[in-house]
Image (spheres, rainbow, N blue to C red):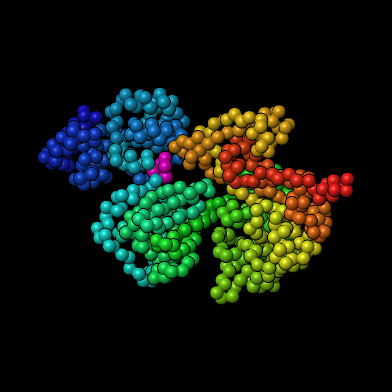
Amino acid sequence: MVSFNRRIVRILEETGMVDMETLTAASQVAKEGDTSVTEYLLEKELVKSGPLLGVLAEHLGVPPIDLDRVKIQDETLDVMSLETAKETGCLPICRTGNVLTIAVSNPFDVVRHDDLRLATGCDLRLALALEPKIEEAIQRAYTGDSGNLADILDSVDDPEMKIHEGKSDDDDVVELGADGNDGDAPVIKIVNLIIYNAIKMKASDIHIEAFEKRVLVRYRVDGALENAMEPPKRLQKAIISRLKIMASLDIAERRKPQDGKFQVKAEGRQIDFRVSTLPCVHGEKVVLRILDGGNLALSLDSLGFEEKALNDFRKSINSPYGMILVTGPTGSGKTTTLYSAVKEIMTEEDNFVTVEDPVEYQVDGINQVQVNVKSGLTFAAALRSILRQDPDTVMIGEIRDPETIDIAIKAALTGHLVLSTLHTNDAASTISRMLDMGVDPFMVASATLLVSAQRLVRRLCPRCKETIEVKPEKLRDLGYSEEEIKKGVELWRAVGCNRCAAGYAGRFALLETLPISEAIKKMIIDGHSAIEIRHKALEEGMISLRRAALLNAARGNTSVEEVLRVTLSENVRPSFAGRQAAEEE
């Protein structure tokens, strides 16, 4: 490092880019501390990074690279771990055959480059970058962190800084750059940094929470919340006001909840955000739901369903009429499943209409209706009008009240295919829920084609997962059969590496499908309970959520911990007929 610093000093002295007094001071600091001449000059803002890189590249004979404009593929990062990149100060840029291009700050560190050549098994092609830029790029590439909150906060001079509380003149779509910068105001930079980092991390939600002495920003990644950053408490109101302005909300109203939405343009695509505010003890909590239309490129085959469930679902959506329900908690992927189904069956000959609150994804070729309760456009009112619009397939975002389900049932009985969602725990409970909403059992049995329950589980990272040994007694408790245990069940656990979140990378769906067979129809009409209907469905071959999770755990797709976290154990009970026979004996 010392000899390289001397070479840098000579180059800058010869070119006259920096005066001798400054170079002497930089050399002294670099000699005393663990830093370089270029780091010192850039930190003190004595030179600009662009001209400095150009001069050094020309005199060192190594091509320069602008790391702010480079997007590195995951496959390239796989050749070098985060720890190795930080330790060596080198970043892999691209790989062509057996040639790996890396960004380096010292192209003459032969020993280090030889070690990398052996570790990666590749011939190295060097590109010159400045040391601070390499450090930033390593952090951004491996962890998705695209900015530094501390750097933004350095520009906040006024401790009582406020944002103008008035109508927003912003455009409908906010342009978001890789540096999270959309203006000179630090608060705008902070908000855009929060949003941009969430997009990079593929988060589904952003939570901004106000506590007594701090503000906490958390991202929901793969269904689990994780801490992201803690802006200063003094900026709490300004950050929330900025988000309200973006969502066209009343920034002066802090005593009651509000809902809004906005769009941002990032990485070449438009992404929708749904905003919800909630007054809490120490200020408003804001949750942003990220709605990325890229998810709708998924086909039903890629969602992760078991073959039996997929066949049941596919058979139902290809029926000419009837009602199909997908159930589960908020955030379980119900809407994505329905849109994937619609995209599979939609044709130019059919009229597809949806009624949603809100319209989460805009799809070309589908007539989408946004519910507006204030103007009287409820689910039921919209559905009544839709049925006069000559529809073939109708998708209802959610059935919330007896009036809506009554109209949906009648639509399914009069030649329309109806797809919708309900909030229930499993497929069999959906039938009880419909009956509780006042629908006649005969109507439920006649109109319904299939009810299903869905959950999302985290997928184990294929790079770091490890096998574990589980005793047969534990396997029985989990729900594996004696036959499976005898054959051998291999289970895996999450480990964690620089390319995943605590051992998990992405999620996939579990689907429990209950086709309304003739036997099930008779049980509904006869008033059998949800438990009895569920047991009959299992006898007919239904794969439950727990069973689907166990099958995926045995394939190495997920862990036992995820199985237990997401699904309930099977409560095997005798059927109604079995209990009756036992009582007669």
Q: Looking at this view, is 34 or 196 the one in front? A: 34
Question: How many labels were placed on the picture?
Answer: 0
Picture residue at 83% right of the left edge, 46% below the top: 578
| Residue 299 visible within the image | no
Q: Where is residue 232 drawn, in percent x and y?
A: 33, 55
Can you name the residue that lies furthest to the left here? 21
The answer to whether residue 581 is above or below residue 362 is above
Q: Where is residue 160 drawn, in percent x and y?
A: 27, 62
Quadrant where the N terminus sits is top left
Judge left or right: residue 187 versus residue 540. left
Picture residue at 67% right of the left edge, 52% below the top: 426
Quadrant where the C terminus sits is top right
Q: Where is residue 545 drawn, in percent x and y?
A: 66, 46
Can you name the residue that lies furthest to the bottom here? 375
Judge left or right: residue 266 versus residue 417. left
Q: Quadrant of residue 304?
A: top right
Q: Quadrant of residue 264?
A: bottom left
Residue numbers of the magenta segment: 140-144
The answer to whether residue 446 is above or below residue 77 is below
